[in-house]
Image (cartoon, grey):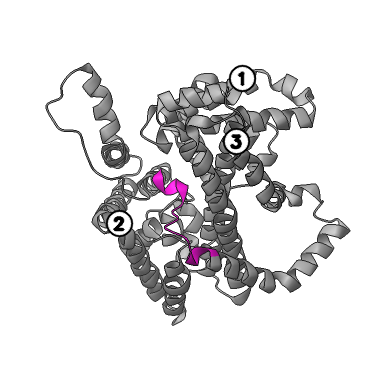
């Protein structure tokens, strides 16, 4: 089940809200959320729900042991064992086939290639579990005593499938003291409808263009069409994932939780580093706090640490060498920007912005093509295609003109363009409060009409 399905919007969500609101008892509400979250996961992945439940209860008990033995060698052994088991499960289910493929190049192996499908959300809930046991070990949080509350933390449907990667300390206090009122409900509904609009009206349309130019018409691309296709994939990836994050944040708010922002208008960035401070923020923070800083951070071997983090970030996205290459690509540019920081600061903003967009859009080719032969052909087409422009390209450009304008408007960080205290922004904010219900209904109706005639439309980040 996905947030952008009619089943979720008109059946699952209303029922969950109804049962959740029957009583003000936090215990009953937590039980309701846990049961609905397990049902949400089992709807699409019934065979892997046991793996998630095992992870939750395993790390629940490890957290208790780590806290009990705090300051002793047993605590260090326990946290190390917990991380080992969590990573072993992730590697086994996500990277088993990838490892087998590479080892088999050295010779025949005494065991068959693993054929397990990837459990949805495992990359996200594994990192959440690891962050919990590490934070308990460091003394940043107290171990959760209630197994139901911890299972709810791991399995919350709002973040389960594709994040954001929620830290335990973010929602620990809200577990038994959530504020739920009409104001927060309204804010949650608005955010959910905005995310739904991004997904259905922008990301799915971009996805259709991506399929047309990067799949169906791959062999006959002109350079213009190649750049157009990969730009559309950049649009699809952003609005698909930021739309999901908006929906997750909105859903969390409906049930009394506050999730941190996961995107902050990345396409307004002035550098690659700035871009990834705005993109998938929760993942960046995880690697910063649990990998980069423990390796030495900015104190020692900074450039090495940057490259390690980015290679791991690439590998986290998928069990394929193209993702490792993608990580190395950005690791190199992060290092270059560190070394040339004084020069970049003196460079005009428009040039920095242009340079960033070109690097980001080009990188999507590394992200999209897992087949290196196709990647090679595509890169050649980007810069030196001998194919003529197809007639359909001009038609697509004209037919989607209004949609292109909409994409640009959604990419602009209006809160950065207009000062918070400017009269214009204050008036617009006040006016929007009056029309917000109408906008929400319009977004919901339009998305529903498009979903009625659509096929299955999963979020891209459920693959990672």
In the rendered image, residue 462 lying in the magenta stretch gets the answer yes
Tag count in the figure? 3
Foreground: 365 or 324?
Answer: 365
Mark 1, residue position: 336
Label 2 residue SS: loop
Q: Give how far across and how far down residue 81 sits, in percent.
A: 27, 39
Q: Give how far across and how far down residue 110 sits, in percent.
A: 11, 26
- Marks 1, 3: nearer the viewer: 3
At x 48%, y 30%, the residue is 219
Which disc, if any, is residue 254? none
Q: Looking at the picture, does residue 427 appear above or below residue 366?
A: below
Q: Looking at the picture, does residue 293 appear above or below residue 456?
A: above
Q: Is residue 255 left or right of residue 344?
A: left
Mark 2, residue position: 45
Label 3 residue SS: loop
Q: Quadrant of residue 37?
A: bottom left
Quarter of the picture containing the C terminus is top left
Q: Are marks 1 and 3 in contact (CB under 8 Å)?
A: no
Q: CA distance from mark 2 to mark 3?
A: 42 Å
Which stretch did the figure color magenta? 450-464
Q: Give how far across and how far down residue 62 sits, in percent.
A: 29, 48
At x 79%, y 23%, the residue is 346
At x 52%, y 45%, the residue is 282
- Marks 1, 2: nearer the viewer: 2
Q: Earlier in the sequence, mark 1 or mark 2?
A: 2
Quarter of the picture containing the N terminus is bottom left
For the question of whether residue 140 can be seen, the reply is no
At x 24%, y 19%, the residue is 105
Mark 3, residue position: 390
């Amino acid at each position: 089940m996905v947030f952008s399905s009619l089943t979720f919007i008109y059946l699952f969500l209303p029922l969950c809200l109804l049962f959740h609101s029957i009583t003000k008892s936090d215990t009953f509400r937590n039980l309701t959320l846990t049961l609905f979250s397990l049902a949400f996961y089992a709807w699409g992945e019934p065979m892997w729900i046991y793996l998630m439940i095992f992870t939750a209860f395993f790390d629940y008990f490890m957290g208790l042991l780590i806290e009990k033995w705090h300051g002793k060698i047993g605590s260090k052994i326990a946290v190390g064992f917990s991380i080992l088991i969590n990573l072993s499960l992730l590697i086994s289910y996500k990277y088993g086939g990838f490892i087998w493929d590479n080892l088999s190049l050295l010779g025949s192996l005494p065991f068959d290639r693993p054929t397990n499908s990837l459990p949805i959300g495992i990359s996200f809930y594994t990192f959440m579990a690891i962050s919990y046991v590490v934070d308990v070990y460091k003394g940043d949080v107290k171990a959760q005593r209630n197994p139901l509350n911890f299972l709810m933390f791991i399995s919350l449907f709002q973040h389960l499938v594709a994040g954001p990667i929620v830290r335990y300390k973010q929602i620990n206090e809200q577990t038994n003291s959530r504020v739920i009122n009409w104001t927060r409900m309204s804010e949650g509904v608005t955010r959910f409808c905005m995310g739904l609009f991004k997904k259905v009206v922008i990301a799915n349309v971009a996805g259709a263009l991506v399929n047309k130019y990067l799949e169906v018409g791959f062999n006959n691309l002109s350079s213009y069409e190649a750049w157009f296709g990969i730009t559309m994939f950049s649009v699809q990836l952003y609005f698909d994932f930021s739309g999901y994050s908006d929906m997750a944040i909105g859903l969390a708010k409906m049930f009394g939780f506050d999730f941190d922002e996961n995107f902050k208008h990345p396409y307004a960035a002035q550098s690659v580093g700035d871009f990834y401070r705005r993109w998938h923020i929760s993942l960046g923070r995880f690697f910063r706090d649990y990998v980069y800083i423990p390796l030495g951070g900015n104190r020692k071997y900074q450039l090495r640490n940057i490259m390690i983090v980015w290679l791991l970030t690439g590998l986290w996205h998928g069990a394929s060498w193209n993702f490792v290459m993608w990580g190395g690509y950005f690791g190199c540019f992060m290092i270059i920007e560190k070394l040339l920081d004084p020069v970049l600061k003196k460079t005009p903003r428009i040039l920095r912005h242009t340079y960033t967009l070109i690097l980001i859009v080009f990188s999507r080719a590394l992200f999209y093509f897992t087949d290196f032969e196709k990647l090679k052909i595509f890169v050649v087409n980007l810069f030196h295609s001998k194919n003529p422009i197809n007639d359909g390209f001009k038609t697509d450009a004209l037919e989607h003109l209004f949609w292109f304008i909409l994409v640009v408007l959604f990419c602009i960080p209006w809160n950065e363009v207009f000062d918070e205290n400017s009269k214009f922004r204050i008036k617009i904010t006040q006016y929007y409060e009056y029309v917000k219900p109408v906008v929400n209904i319009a977004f919901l109706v339009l998305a529903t009409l498009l979903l009625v005639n659509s096929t299955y439309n999963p979020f891209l980040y459920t693959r990672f």
